[in-house]
C-alpha cells in the first residue's frame, strides 16, 4: 500500500520561499505508474490543485500559481518536492501531496497534510 | 478558486438519504470524469467515487455517484453519524488543471 508523508517548515516568512517534500513509501516513483501532485487547502476552505510531476521530471502547474511554483522529483530518495516563491499570508494553508494513477483522473493516494503558516 | 459549485451544507437524520450536487460547465464536468472525496474532520481527503459512479474497494454501496451534462451528484443512503464530513467533487478542466468543488458539509441530525 502506497503511503505519502509531507515534511517541511511549518512557518515561513512573507516574501520567502515555501519548501515541502513528500516521501513516498510502499511503491517506487520510478515505476512510472503515477503522477505526483501537490494540493492545498486554505483554512476552512476548499481544495486547490497546485501542480504535478511525473518520474521523468515533466511537470504541469496550475496557471494561477505557475509563476511561483516549482515541483521537482528525486527518484533516488523516492521523494518529490514543492517550492512556492514570494509567499504571502494568502499562501497559508494545509499542503497535501497526492498520487494519481497514469491514465486516470482521480487522486487515490493522499498524504496526511502539513500546515504551513506565512507570518513574520 | 473553486470552479465547481456545491451547496454549503446538507443534513438528514440517521438512516435517511442525502444528495450533494456539483455544478460545473462544459469546460470541466461536461467533458471529464468526476470524482468525489470525503474529508473527515482533521484528516486528508479520501477517494469516495471515481469515474462518475465507481466505488474504490472498501467504500460501501451506500455511496453512489452520477453525472448528467455539466452536473454531478453524490448520494448517501442509510446515513450514519460516521458520515459527518466535508465532501468535495473534483474533475479536470480545459486548461488541464484539476479543479474541485466548494465543498459540502454533511450533518447527521
Image (cartoon, coloured by chain):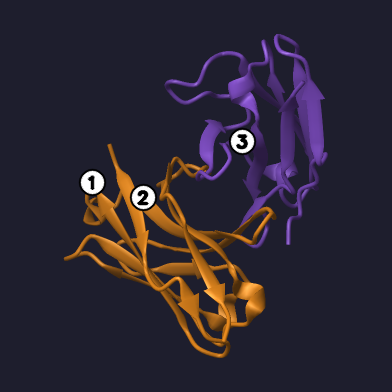
Would residue B88 appear left or right of A119 to someone viewing this image?
Answer: right
Residue visible at 80% across and 46% down?
A: B5
Q: In x, y percent, where is residue B48?
A: 55, 30
Mark with earlier residue (1, 2): 1
Q: Which structural element holds mark 3?
A: strand
How far apart are the two marked residues, 3 and 2, measured between alpha carbons? 19 Å
Label 3 belongs to which residue?
Answer: B36
The answer to whether dots 3 and 2 both sit on one chain is no
Chain (purple): B
Are discs 1 and 2 less than 8 Å apart at CB?
yes
The answer to whether dots 1 and 2 both sit on one chain is yes
Chain bearing tag 2 is A
> Label 3: how many residues lie within 10 Å, few (<14), some (14-19) or many (20+)?
many
Label 2 belongs to which residue?
Answer: A34
Residue visible at 43% across and 20% down?
A: B58
Location of the N terminus of chain B (image quadrant): bottom right
Q: Is residue A92 above or below residue B45?
A: below
How far apart are the two marked residues, 1 and 3, measured between alpha carbons? 24 Å
* Quarter location, residue A79: bottom left
> Label 1: how many residues lie within 10 Å, few (<14), some (14-19) or many (20+)?
few
Q: In x, y percent, where is residue A104?
A: 48, 42
Label 1 belongs to which residue?
Answer: A27
Chain A shown in which color?
orange
Residue B69 visible, this angle: no
The answer to whether dots 1 and 3 both sit on one chain is no
Amino acid at each position: 500500500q502506497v503511503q505519502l508523508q509531507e515534511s517541511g517548515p511549518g512557518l515561513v516568512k512573507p516574501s520567502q520561499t515555501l519548501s515541502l517534500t513528500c516521501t513516498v513509501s510502499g511503491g517506487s516513483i520510478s515505476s512510472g505508474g503515477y503522477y505526483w501532485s501537490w494540493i492545498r487547502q486554505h483554512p476552512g476552505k476548499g481544495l486547490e490543485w497546485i501542480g504535478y510531476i511525473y518520474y521523468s521530471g515533466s511537470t504541469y502547474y496550475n496557471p494561477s500559481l505557475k509563476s511561483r511554483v516549482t515541483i521537482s522529483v528525486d527518484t533516488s530518495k523516492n521523494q518529490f518536492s514543492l517550492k512556492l516563491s514570494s509567499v504571502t499570508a494568502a499562501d497559508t494553508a494545509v499542503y497535501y501531496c497526492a498520487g494519481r494513477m497514469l491514465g486516470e483522473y482521480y487522486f487515490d493516494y493522499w498524504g496526511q497534510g502539513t500546515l504551513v503558516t506565512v507570518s513574520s | 478558486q473553486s470552479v465547481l459549485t456545491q451547496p454549503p451544507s446538507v443534513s438528514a437524520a440517521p438512516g435517511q438519504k442525502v444528495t450533494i450536487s456539483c455544478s460545473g460547465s462544459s469546460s470541466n464536468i461536461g467533458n471529464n470524469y468526476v470524482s468525489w472525496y470525503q474529508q473527515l474532520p482533521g484528516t486528508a481527503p479520501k477517494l469516495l467515487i471515481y469515474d462518475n459512479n465507481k466505488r474504490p474497494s472498501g467504500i460501501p454501496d451506500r455511496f453512489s455517484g452520477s453525472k448528467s451534462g455539466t452536473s454531478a451528484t453524490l448520494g448517501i443512503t442509510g446515513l450514519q453519524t460516521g458520515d459527518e464530513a466535508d465532501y468535495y467533487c473534483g474533475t479536470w478542466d480545459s486548461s488541464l488543471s484539476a479543479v474541485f468543488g466548494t465543498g459540502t458539509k454533511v450533518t447527521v441530525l
